[in-house]
Image (cartoon, rainbow, N blue to C red):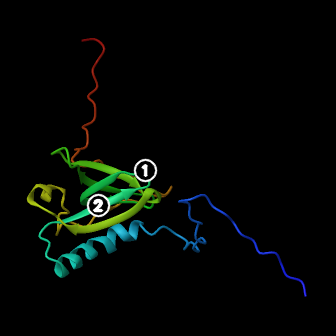
Amino acid sequence: MSQQPSRVLYLPPGVAAAAPQAVAIPGLPFDRNFFQNILPQAIQSFCTQVECGVPVVELLTVDGTTHFVNGISGVSDQWVALHTSELDHEHVKQVFVPYQTIFRVEVHPAENERRHRLGFLLGAPRPMSVSTGPDAPAVPPVNEKPRAAAKKVSAGR
């Protein structure tokens, strides 16, 4: 009877062996459908279950950035456009975040009134959907009137 040698891996103190990798599910967990349909309803549902007059939505990206989301202004097949606030600044900005960079989305009540400006605006209109394929129609600029035709000027003036 022969025995197979046992394999032992000795690791330095404080280092743990990596767990076996989980099978990846195809597609991104945070995609157009998530931001257009799932997240707004999840926030509403959360606020009915937990007392939160102002929900704070934190979106974390793989580069370590935390975005405090006030609203979703647009979605495409590749990115989401978000209105965000920062802890240190009063102004709101719009950021375009590629779906593949989103690591986690958290929803929780604002801890105090100072953080209310970081909160998500409940009851906001649904995000605008943008088609980005080759057959997609051109998106007209917002709040821009069509230009009048240029007037011809005679050269002999």
Q: Quadrant of residue 90?
A: top left
Q: Judging from the image, what secondary structure is the residue with disc 1 in?
A: loop
Residue drawn at (89%, 83%), measured in percent from left and top? 2
Relative to 37, say whether 94 is above or below: above
Indicate the position of residue 126 as horizontal and vertical percent values: 25, 67
Indicate the position of residue 137 as horizontal and vertical percent values: 41, 56
> Three-letter amino acid code at disc 1?
Asp
The mark that comes first in sequence, 2 or 1, is 2
Q: Name the residue under label 1.
A: 63
Mark 2 and mark 1: Cα distance apart in space = 14 Å
Q: In which quarter of the image is residue 156?
A: top left
Residue nearest the viewer, comparing 58 with 75 = 58
Q: Mark 2 points at which residue?
A: 58
Indicate the position of residue 93 as horizontal and vertical percent values: 24, 47
Contact between marks 2 and 1 (CB within 8 A): the answer is: no
Residue drawn at (30%, 54%), measured in percent from left and top? 67
Relative to 154, say whether 64 is above or below: below
Q: Quadrant of residue 110?
A: bottom left
In this view, which residue lies farthest toward the right?
1
Residue drawn at (42%, 61%), measured in percent from left and top? 103
Disc 1 crowd, CA 10 A, few/some/many (<14, 14-19, 20+): few
Disc 2 crowd, CA 10 A, few/some/many (<14, 14-19, 20+): many
> Three-letter amino acid code at disc 2?
Glu
